[in-house]
Image (cartoon, grey):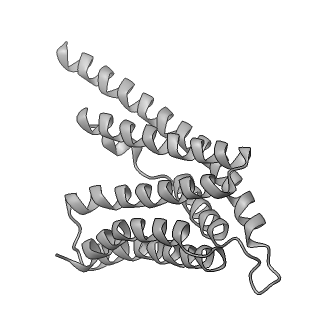
Amino acid sequence: MSLPMILTWLRIGAIPLLVIVFLFTPMEFARPAAACIFGLAALTDFLDGYLARRWDQQSAFGAFLDPVADKLIVTVALVLLVFTDGDLPIVIATAVIIGREVFVSALREWMAARGISAAVKVSPLGKLKTTAQMFAILFLLYHFPLFGLIDVHTIGYWLLMLAAVLTVVSGAQYARAAIIAVERAESASRTDER
């Protein structure tokens, strides 16, 4: 098994550890430790893709498993935050983010079945959304003022709201790209039949 694949599996393996630390350790330890676990998992997300490309160790299974690992740990972390910090805007942002992930995953699968999956590849806006989302979750998990001065919880809160907005916009972009690709494919199919 390649190192990039091991890093992806480690990210999945970090999920139960994140839950146990967050829910079953004293609060003053749980939040920073959970943030540390999530931050290290987010770092493996960057590293596994980078190393797979650099070392030419990309695989179809790795390309499938990497986004699954991301979605799993993000979903679990957001649910934990709703459980402890669940004011209405966090609940709504969480529902939007998870709903969009389900929608885009289903859309990609449907497009792949039609042979036109290239239309729903990751966009720059999607990457910006992911960055805002990861930092938001990291800061919200940490919760306490950093160095007694920086209110990371408030920063994380507003980053999560930004991520929710970007989630809607990028999801709409994916849907529009899919509609255009389907229309083109159907038009080409009709032309071929003539």
Rendered view: 83 above or below 96: below
Quarter of the image for residue 129 reads bottom right
Image coordinates of residue 163 in percent, x first then y, are 63, 53
Image coordinates of residue 96 in percent, x first then y, are 59, 42
Q: Residue at x 51, y 40 (%)?
A: 99
Q: Residue at x 31, y 39 (%)?
A: 109
Image coordinates of residue 126 in percent, x first then y, are 53, 53
Number of on-image labels: 0
Given residues 93 and 49, the one toward you in this image is: 93
Quarter of the image for residue 5 reads bottom left
Quarter of the image for residue 33 reads bottom right
Image coordinates of residue 19 in percent, x first then y, are 47, 65
> Is 40 left, or right, of 86 in this rendering?
left
**Furthest residue to the right?**
149
Q: Quadrant of the N terminus?
A: bottom left
Q: Residue at x 24, y 35 (%)?
A: 113
Given residues 79 and 179, the one toward you in this image is: 79
**Furthest residue to the top?**
194
Given residues 77 and 106, the one toward you in this image is: 77
> Is 147 left, or right, of 45 in this rendering?
right
> Is 53 left, or right, of 95 in this rendering?
left
> Is 106 left, or right, of 189 in this rendering?
right
Rendered view: 25 above or below 194: below
Q: Quadrant of the C terminus?
A: top left
Q: Residue at x 28, y 24 (%)?
A: 188
